[in-house]
Amino acid sequence: MTSRASIDENLAVGVTSMILSFSSGNIEVASPEVEETLGYLPNELIGLSFAALIHPEDQFAFDDAETLFWESRKRSYLRVRLLDARSEYVEVDIAFARRTEGDDPTLTIELSLLEATIDLDDPTFTTSEIDEITGLYTIDYLNSEYERVRKVIGDELPGVALLLVDIDRFSVIESALGVHGSHAVLRVVANRFEDALGGLFLLVHVKRDNFAVLCLGVTEHAQVEMVAHALRTTLDSPVIAPDGEEVVVTASIGVAFAFDQSTSGVDLVDSATLARDRAKARGSGKLEYFAESMVSNAKDRRNFENMVRRAIDDEDIVVLFQPIISLEARKICGVEALVRLRHQDRGLISPTEFIPVAKEIGRLPRMGAKVAKYALESLQEWQRRYPDQELTLGLNLSGDELEEPDLVSNLISQVGASGIDPSILMVEIGTVDNNPSSKAHNSIEQLAKANIGLSVDEFGAGSSALSIFSRYQVSQVKIDRSLVLTLGQNERVLGVVGGLVNLAHSMKAEVVGIGVERAEQIRLMRSINIDKVQGYHIGPPIERDQIETQLELLSVRPTS
């Protein structure tokens, strides 16, 4: 048996400590501070099994952490719930501090009581630390808690992992459900996350669609992925919104580690944010760990944002026009306006790169207005110079752009001011949320009321296009390029496209085949009564003056 004197030497002065027998798990010694922490007199605990004080749900975590400590010999930490003298469970941080060898090895643990239950009516309490939407702590509390741990523990700071959890496509949820409904979804998600963590780690609501989890003593990817799996599993079942609608929720997660006290709370959050951004860039439901290379990538991102901002503000955007050919008349019958950004080193940049950035920096409505102004002015000039050419003008609005009410209302105003027949303008609509009450659908309704032609892009791919087609009077559909590219490879594809053409024609909509790259595709599309074609085989996107050259050749001049 280890002597009492040698045991007492292992207790830190002023710290709530206990020494446990390795063989029995019983408490052999408890420091006087245990009365303040748990309400017990020290001698009341002697001989009791420490496991009896641990909440049943936390028992396995404690056992695993204890085993890891014995194997690694490194100080480690865990948050558990312990039964106090009032027979109530309180949350404490446990530090596995020291151990002794011998016939009966012992384990010294140190306890730190977490903040007491918060009284929101207490005037001394900082309400900024409680989030009004979810009732969780805020990021301010997480930072203060992390800094407290750094200060108290110092050089012996355990490994810490911060998980930054981002709800994917939350803007779509907001658009569909409004503020009240989206906040209700956040509250459900917060409750599910709390249940999954079981009080072991600190969960906070950072802002809007972001949560954070601070994990003391977590240093391995495998440990992080267990926590991430627990959080994601709670989202397997849809969230029921206040209106009864099922909302599918997924989450992207960025992770950063701090292995010593040199990492500040701000640095930890910044690193996790970069990792989260990388995860979101890969698609929904992904997890990424912070790497130093992300810092340079973040700088590149800021530079790109600045370039997009300057290009839009300084009108360094390029509008190209791609010709659309009538298969019956075999001549240009319309153009689609396509926007690009001009980069000094990279040349013309695709909208798939800069439109999401333009949305984030608030420049999407401004860019849309400039593109529409240039395209409408071009059409006005062509109508004046080539009155025999009956041209339509296609303007492509992405889902992000349709979410911007100002952009759509500005477009309607511009069309009205131009004097152009709104029906010859074809607003091309891609993938949008299927919820009819979303901002995107409200924008589509406004366009339809203004008699602006609706063109459904990606027809034949996914449910979004069919949803728009079934809900609104559509003037035009564009067969998805993936179907056009496979024309001629087998008869089934031709049959599918033919069926889509018949469906569109039955609804009084004309059909455009896009992505044409081979003459054979044109022959096959003519055989199934497709009306118009567009693609690089017909002509690439070109500058306004090049389109005018083609129109000049086709124009009929009156004889003198």
Image (spheres, rainbow, N blue to C red):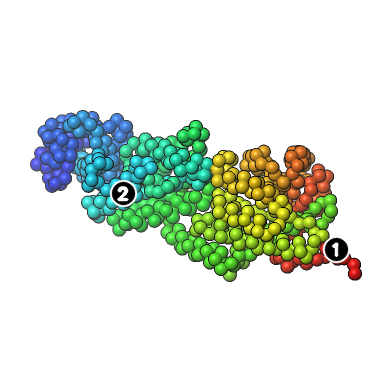
* Residue on which disc 2 sits: 128
Q: Image point 56% across, 57% down: which residue?
A: 365
Q: Quadrant of the N terminus?
A: top left
Helix, strand or loop under label 2: helix
**Left-right relation of 461 to 224:** right
- Residue found farthest to the right: 560
- Location of residue 256 in the rendering, given as x and y in whole percent from the top left corner: 39, 52
Q: Quadrant of the C terminus?
A: bottom right
- Regarding residue 138, the answer to whether it shows in the image is yes
Viewer-closest of 356 and 383: 383
Query: Which quadrant of the structure image shows residue 311?
Result: bottom right
- Location of residue 115 in the rendering, given as x and y in whole percent from the top left corner: 24, 43
Q: Image point 12% across, 36% down: which residue?
A: 42
* N-term mark: 2 or 1: 2
Q: How many marks?
A: 2
**Left-right relation of 490 to 345:** right
Q: Image point 36% across, 52% down: which residue?
A: 257
Query: Which quadrant of the structure image shows residue 503?
Result: top right
Q: Which mark is residue 556?
A: 1
Distance from disc 2 to disc 1, alpha carbons, whole Å, reads 72 Å
Q: Is residue 492 above or below residue 399?
A: above
How crowded pointer 2 is (Cα within 10 Å; few <14, some 14-19, many 20+) is rated as: few
Query: Which quadrant of the structure image shows residue 295?
Result: bottom left
For the residue marked with disc 1, what is the amino acid?
Val
For the residue marked with disc 2, what is the amino acid?
Ser
- Location of residue 100 in the rendering, given as x and y in whole percent from the top left corner: 19, 42
Helix, strand or loop under label 1: loop
Viewer-closest of 303 and 505: 505
Q: Image point 74% across, 58% down: which residue?
A: 323
